[in-house]
C-alpha cells in the first residue's frame, strides 16, 4: 500500500472529483498531475476518467439542489473560498447562453463547475444532457492538465532534470493558485 498503489490513486481521484464538484475548492487536477509523476500519464488519464465520472455525479447532486432551491444553493456556494457573487452572476448569464460551450470554457477560466451545476438545475436544463456535456468538459480539462504536466516532465527529462519533477509540480500549483487567489481577492 505504498505511494504507487494505483487503487489508492483511483479512490483519491473519485473522491476528489466528487468533492470538488460539490464543496471542495481545490481542483482534482492537483492529484491527477501528481499521478503523472508517480504512475505515468497513461494511468493518470484513467484516473481522470474516474474523476470526471465522479464529478458528474457530484454535479447532478448540485443540479438537483439548484433545481429545488436555487437561492439556498447559491447561498451555500458563497461560503466556499474564492466564490463570490460575481462568479454566480457570470455563470448564471453563461448558462442562459450557449451553456455547453460556456461550461467547457469555464473549466479553464476559473469558474467552478459546481456553480454551473447549480445554475443548470435552476434553469431547468435537461439533466441527462447536462451530465454528458459535464463529463466531456471535465475530462477535457483534466486531460489538458495531465498533458501539459506530462509535457513539462518530458522537457525536464530531455535536459536531464527529471529529479525536479516534484518541484515542478509544487511550483506550478502554487503559481496557479497564487495567481487565482490574487485575481479573486484583488491583491
Image: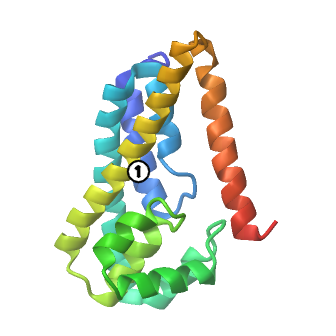
Up/down of 27 relative to 158, above or below = below
- How far across and down, in percent of the image, does residue 76 sit? 56, 77
Residue sitting at x 75%, y 61%: 182
Q: How many marks?
A: 1
* Mark 1 neighbour density, 10 Å: few (under 14) some (14–19) many (20 or more): many
Name the foreground residue: 30 vs 175. 175
> What is the quadrant of the C terminus in the image?
bottom right
Identify the residue shown where x is 41% and y is 65%.
105
Determine which residue is flagged by label 1: 17
Q: Which residue of the protein is positioned furthest toward the left in this rendering?
A: 128
Q: How is the image coloured?
A: rainbow
The residue lying at 53 percent from left, 86 percent from top is: 89
Assign the N terminus to one quadrant of the image.
top left
- Residue nearest the viewer, comparing 127 with 143: 143
| Vertical placement of residue 187 versus 45, above or below | below
Q: Position of residue 23 (x, y in %)?
A: 52, 63
Question: Does 143 sit above or below residue 124?
Answer: above
Can residue 62 be seen from the camera position used here? no
Q: Residue furthest front?
A: 159
Residue at the spot x=58%, y=9% of the render?
160
Q: Nearer the viewer, residue 92 or 64?
A: 92
Viewed as shown, does residue 131 lie left or right of 101? left
Q: Quadrant of residue 102?
A: bottom left
In the rendered image, residue 48, in percent from the top left (x then y), is placed at 34, 41
Amino acid at each position: 500500500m505504498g505511494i504507487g498503489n494505483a487503487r489508492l490513486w483511483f479512490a483519491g481521484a473519485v473522491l476528489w472529483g466528487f468533492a470538488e464538484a460539490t464543496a471542495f475548492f481545490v481542483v482534482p487536477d492537483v492529484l491527477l498531475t501528481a499521478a503523472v509523476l508517480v504512475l505515468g500519464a497513461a494511468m493518470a488519464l484513467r484516473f481522470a476518467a474516474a474523476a470526471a465520472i465522479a464529478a458528474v455525479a457530484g454535479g447532478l447532486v448540485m443540479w438537483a439542489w439548484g433545481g429545488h432551491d436555487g437561492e439556498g444553493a447559491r447561498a451555500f456556494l458563497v461560503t466556499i473560498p474564492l466564490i463570490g457573487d460575481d462568479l454566480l452572476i457570470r455563470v448564471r448569464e453563461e448558462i442562459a447562453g450557449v451553456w455547453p460551450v460556456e461550461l467547457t470554457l469555464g473549466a479553464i477560466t476559473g469558474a467552478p463547475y459546481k456553480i454551473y451545476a447549480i445554475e443548470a438545475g435552476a434553469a431547468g436544463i435537461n439533466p441527462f444532457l447536462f451530465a454528458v456535456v459535464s463529463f466531456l468538459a471535465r475530462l477535457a480539462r483534466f486531460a489538458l492538465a495531465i498533458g501539459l504536466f506530462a509535457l513539462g516532465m518530458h522537457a525536464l527529462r530531455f535536459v536531464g532534470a527529471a529529479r525536479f519533477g516534484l518541484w515542478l509540480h509544487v511550483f506550478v500549483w502554487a503559481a496557479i493558485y497564487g495567481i487565482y487567489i490574487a485575481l479573486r481577492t484583488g491583491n
